[in-house]
Image: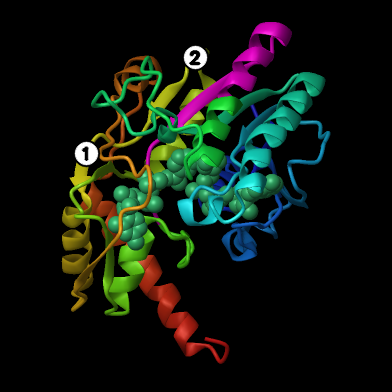
Amino acid sequence: MSKRILVTGGAGFLGSHLCERLLVDNDVICLDNFFTGRRENIEHLLDNHRFELVRHDICERVVLEVDEVFHLACPASPVHYQRNPVRTIRTCVQGTLNVLDLAREVHAKVLIASTSEVYGDPLIHPQVESYWGNVNPIGIRACYDEGKRCAEALAVSYARQYGVQVRIARIFNTYGPRMHENDGRVVSNFIVQCLRNEAITMFGDGKQTRSFCYVDDLIEGFRRLMASDEQEPVNLGNPGEFTMLELAEKVRTLTGSRSEIVHKPLPQDDPIRRRPDITRAIERLGWKPTVALEQGLVRTIDEFRTRIERQSASPRG
Ligand code: NAD
Ligand code: UDP
């Protein structure tokens, strides 16, 4: 049945893909303050009569008659979330409170976009949902990872006390078309650097690992989690694990680039390794990723190449 669905952060990377997918059989309200989001991401949806764009900061209260809320509003790249840490933690805490108040008022179901960062620099590997994490509460990532931990705590408190229906997605590194060229996360950085034949910025020795999920897989995970009765947090990510050196090599090969690797200092509290245990998602949602890293990189590189060529051809470029 068709629903009215609110996507906060809908003009961002994940949000824009989610809006597009949900519009196939629903009415969608995209709410965004354009902190890291872009109008270009949703421009192709503006003519759809089932799509509505609301420019709003989620730190301010909002009431909209909706059936479901996907709460994604929050900068996700360390570069952006550390630029204004107070704003980041306020978005995580006040923004989530406002979303939960809205859900309580209109009896909407809420999916909170949490993160693998709640596990911090994990002492167990791979990470299962029952692990409570190893997080530095005063480090440079705290505005984000502690903010997201608080968002989870708020969500379960509203569920316990007010019976609000909440779903918690712990998202692991996700990449794909439409990431901002200046997003600052590793996949987009390496792709842009390779396409421009600029130095590949490798933080530390490059032996730290991450697990990269292609955006379409993640969006399907979101939809299944929202539709489920799952009360507990669920890891959504691709369990394939790669070092940053391996990632750089793949991107260099797939782009045919001449870029050299240049090492830069490893940022404080940068997790050494990360890989999701997705048993819960497989068993309870019947979900697992289907797009292998190279396959997803090819699609992402194609889109970045087109975008970068278009920009350099335009008079403003
Ligand atoms: P993004 O930066 O591309 O998108 C975030 C969107 O939220 C942007 O459009 C931004 O303008 C908007 N926003 C930020 N603060 C806001 C506010 N106060 N009010 C209204 N809108 C606001 O990032 P993304 O990768 O699309 O991430 C979306 C969500 O998923 C975030 O909550 C992030 O923490 C979570 N997440 C993403 C990943 C990933 O790998 N992409 C991993 C873990 C968690
Ligand atoms: N990284 C890197 N070069 C870059 C950007 C990131 O080597 O230009 C590293 C970063 O230090 C981290 C990994 O890549 O170890 C993933 O970084 P990202 O910012 O994408 O995500 P997160 O650290 O939040 O997982």
Residue at x 69% of width, y 54% of height: 48
Q: Is residue 61 above or below residue 31?
A: above
Q: Which mark is residue 230?
A: 2
Figure quadrant of residue 187: bottom left
Q: Residue 238 in magenta?
A: no
Amino acid type shown at disc 2: Glu
Q: Which residue is mark 1?
A: 240
Kindly indicate the quadrant of the structure image that contains residue 105.
Answer: top right
Q: Residue furthest bottom?
A: 315
Would residue 295 be seen by someone viewing this image from the given angle?
yes
Which is more toward the observer, 138 or 172?
A: 138
SS category of the residue bearing label 1: loop
Residue 214 seen from this side: no
Give the residues drawn in magenta, as a range.
152-176
- Contact between marks 1 and 2 (CB within 8 A): the answer is no
* Marking on residue 282: none
Q: Label 2 crowding class (10 Å Cα cut-off): few <14, some 14-19, many 20+?
A: some
Characterize the local packing of mark 1: few (<14), some (14-19) or many (20 or more) Cα atoms within 10 angstroms. some
Q: SS class of the residue under badge 2? A: loop
Residue closest to the eye, 36 or 304: 36
| Among the two numbered marks 1 and 2 on one chain, the one whose residue lies closer to the N terminus | 2
> Looking at numbered disc 1 in the image, what kind of residue is underneath it?
Gly
Does 154 lie within the magenta span?
A: yes
Q: Classify residue 73 as left or right of residue 94.
A: left
| Residue 112 spot, x, y in % from top left | 57, 29
Distance from disc 1 to disc 2, alpha carbons, whole Å, reads 24 Å
| Left or right position of 295 against 7 | left
Q: Position of residue 31 (x, y in %)?
A: 71, 46
Q: Residue 280: where, in percent of width, then height?
A: 35, 17
Residue at point 51% right, 47% down?
76
